[in-house]
Image: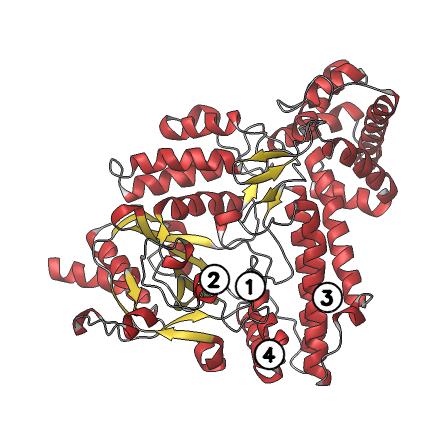
Amino acid sequence: MKNIQSTTKKDSYKKFNGLDGSHPFQKILPEGFVGYKARTRRGGKVRYFNFDLAVQMGLIPKDHNFELDKELEKKILDTFAIIIINEFDIENDKKFPEKEIRSGTFMATRYLQLQHKDKKGRASGDGRSVWNGQVRHQGKTWDVSSCGTGATKLSPATAKYEKFFESGDPSISYGCGYAEIDEGIAQALFSEVFYQNEVQTERTLAVIEFEKGYAINIRAHQNLLRPSHFFMYLKQNEIEPLKDLVDFYIEGQRQNKHWESCPKGSGKYEFFLNELAKTFGYTASVFENEYIFCWLDWDGDNILMDGGIIDYGSIRQFGMFHSEYRYDDDDRFSTSILEQRDKARYIVQTFIQLIDYIQSGEKKNINDFKKHKVLDVFDDSFENEKNENILFKMGFSKKESNYLIKNELKLTKEFRKVFSYFERAKSKKGVIKVADGISVDAIFCMRDILRTLPKLLITRKEKITDSEFIEILKSNYATKEDCEINAYRSKMIKLYQDLYWKLIEKSAKHSRQSFEKHILSLSMRASVVNKMERVTGDSISIIVEKLLKERNKSSVGEIYKLIKDFAEIQNFNPSEKPKLQKEVKGLVKQFFEIVKEHREGL
């Protein structure tokens, strides 16, 4: 009987076997990657496994419990605990036991990267990652890659110093090819929070720890291609592989049933552009609305083709609109949140140039496409999401928001403008240094006024005073001077409340509800959407430290449940049943307090 059970369990994990380095990309674009043999990396211990994601991918059965049995742990290590045999190993004639060398070839994909001297992608791409392959389950295809599997020839260090590096070389940081355990746990935590709130992102499938805190961090998404994969061929004037890649991506979107209405003929390229414009307009708006810093730039390296977040090293979610924050990457500063919209729009403009090149055979100047009609699609998508988001934050339902956008768009935009005035107010202290860059402090916490104002209107049935308004808004960053109420600020406070009141009246009248009943409904929804305890990058760092201290005391299942419970608490969807605060216990309760303490920061 034991043998039968063991065989059944092994069979239930058989989809892991397909993650052997093989991927359709290798046949479509053999010049688009560097292939590496890999060998088994010993001494690994599974520290995190995303059971929910594994079920979605078909890697484990849906009735699997949330604990790591011996067979599953062995399968994870057998599949993902690898290190590539790189150019340094070959140059130095390093020998490895044949039984440790994997049969497959793992690809480090080539793509454009801003930090490389060569702006055409000839030597850039996956510097410390390889793709494990692809799995298909219930009509969906998932790409899987691992970060920390050794130094490839595509890292910035190899390009800069013009030599190959040994994996794990302590003399070079990013170029050593290794990842660290805190990176993996931070990404698992952050990506699950974003996933709960329907922000597109790659997700962490597993984290394997090795000696000295090194790790292999395994990520999955339905398509791991970035705009930079495409832009590399555009910059190199390689039209054939460019067309092959676009066709490959379109077909993948069809197979995953994202683009089922995409035409089969040449019309597919117009469809491709329109979908891309809508996606990046929406994404840029979400990042701005939710204060997500992603470091979007012209090369399209730090974003996936569907607008998904990738590579969490520089990802931040601010507690307030710290719109002047810039990440310091040694030799340059990043874009700011407000600049991300223009960068996203330029990515779309570059795709317009790219598709024109495929169709005409002539590569025209990027400036020829400044006024292309597809950019209007981007702008409309950005604006639509902006309008929907402000009404969502106010507490309006989807149906109510649709009515207001259709019939009271001018009023909605006027309120947005006043809201933005307070949201973008900055400290008079000016530019300051922060842990990983520079910033100018925002001074007003807009979630506080959105959460508190409707409650006050319910009880008092009248507008609040200027000083009360500022008292609710002001953050810990605001000085006395920052909070002064001059004539213009007083005017804006009045306008904010007047427009707020009018939008509620219009919606209440359409819904045939009393003003009082309508605002009560808004208040309940706004209290969930604008929760005080909203995770920031600062709080994630502290929570990860606590999680790492627990990793030797807790099982993989317990670590998974901690992250899952925390992410669920961070769900701001008012339509879903909230997790009651009284249920929050132990470490999750501590995480909750950390988030509250750092809720206004970076």
Whichever of labels 3 and 4 marks the residue nearer the N terminus, that label is 4
Residue 345 image point, x, y percent:
72, 59
Residue 246 image point, x, y percent:
60, 75
The numbered mark at residue 113 is: 1
Whichever of labels 4 and 2 marks the residue nearer the N terminus, that label is 2
Q: Amino acid at mark 1?
A: Gln
Whichever of labels 1 and 3 marks the residue nearer the N terminus, that label is 1
5, 590: nearer the viewer: 590
Residue extending farthest to the front is: 161
* Disc 2, SS: helix
Residue 556 image point, x, y percent:
29, 44
Marks 3 and 2: CB-CB under 8 Å? no
Marks 4 and 1: CB-CB under 8 Å? no
What residue is rendered at 45% in x and 74% in y?
33
Q: Is residue 73 above or below residue 67?
A: below
Residue 329 in view here: yes
Determine which residue is flagged by label 2.
156
Q: Amino acid at mark 4?
A: Leu
Crowd band around label 3 with a 10 angstrom C-alpha radius: few (<14), some (14–19), many (20+)? many
What residue is rendered at 64% in x and 28% in y?
524
Disc 4/disc 1 C-alpha distance (Å): 17 Å
Please tell me whether mark 2 or mark 1 is closer to you in this view.
2
Q: Is residue 178 above or below residue 137?
A: above
Q: Amino acid at mark 3?
A: Gln
Marks 4 and 2: CB-CB under 8 Å? no
